Amino acid sequence: MADKTILVVEDEAAIREMLVMALERGGFAVREAGDAVEAESSIADQLPDLVLLDWMLPGASGVELARRLRRDDYSRELPIIMLTARGEEEDKVRGLESGADDYVVKPFSPRELLARINALLRRSGVEDEEPLRFEGLVLDPAGHRVSADGSPLEMGPTEYRLLHFFMSHPERVFSRAQLLDRVWSRGTYVEERTVDVHIRRLRKALEEQGYDRFVQTVRGAGYRFSVQG
């Protein structure tokens, strides 16, 4: 599972450090968050391959965060393993019902945790994500990379999410409100004209090879991604 990124959401620094060390030894890239707000910001910036989520967090709990992630189209399929000291069956059921895919009770061995992570990543199909291709434009979800005619393209995280959504739903027209709901959906207020700004940035990233023509304005309706003129 090389090159896979795990987001560790744990408020106790000593436990977080132990988890980071174990995961890095296991070959993963690791990002850290100490609470739900930090975690949501990190996920919004770039989707990790899996989240290790502590049940007890300051502010919003891990259970609340898992529910929010599952309600959001952007993070709905994100694999989540809940970490907790609660070992009762009722607590396990509550954790799984919140949207967690697996549940590990503290204390646990790093070896067990790595085995659970690798098993969940295999079940989630992270290794099998196929690149999206339209002519010479290629978006690789597993590597989080975009290329045009073999050359890598640089774009911001919002433009990447926009392009991923468009390429996953070609030939369909989406209003600005729908794009805000499906691409942003971070629980923060964003004006509809913000969509136009990011559409312009996306087109600029694609224009050198001429693929900006794929991102089309449909007058009075919104935008669509189409290889047809």
Image (tube, rainbow, N blue to C red):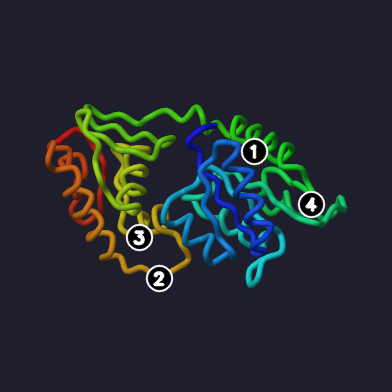
Report the mark closest to the observer, 4 or 2: 4
At numbered mark 1, what does the secondary structure look like: helix, strand or loop?
A: helix
- Residue at image location 36% in from the left, 48% down from the top: 161
Compare marks 4 and 2 and give the one earlier in the sequence: 4
Q: In 3D space, how far apart are the residues under numbered discs 3 and 4 (Cα atoms)?
A: 43 Å
Name the image quarter holding the N terminus: top right
> Which residue was labeled with disc 3?
177
- Residue at image location 58% in from the left, 64% down from the top: 36
Compare marks 4 and 1 and give the one earlier in the sequence: 4
Residue 53 in picture, x, y percent from top left: 64, 54
Residue 4 in picture, x, y percent from top left: 50, 38
In the depicted view, which residue is nearer to us: 79 or 27? 27
Report the mark closest to the observer, 3 or 4: 4
Compare marks 3 and 4 and give the one earlier in the sequence: 4
Residue 106 bears which disc, if any? 4
- Residue at image location 57% in from the left, 44% down from the top: 50
Tag 2: amino acid: Tyr
- Residue at image location 46% in from the left, 62% down from the top: 186
> Which residue was labeled with disc 1?
117
Residue 189 bears which disc, if any? 2
Tag 1: amino acid: Ile
Q: Residue furthest right?
A: 88
Could you tell whether 28 is left or right of 117 in the image? Answer: left
Tag 3: amino acid: Ala
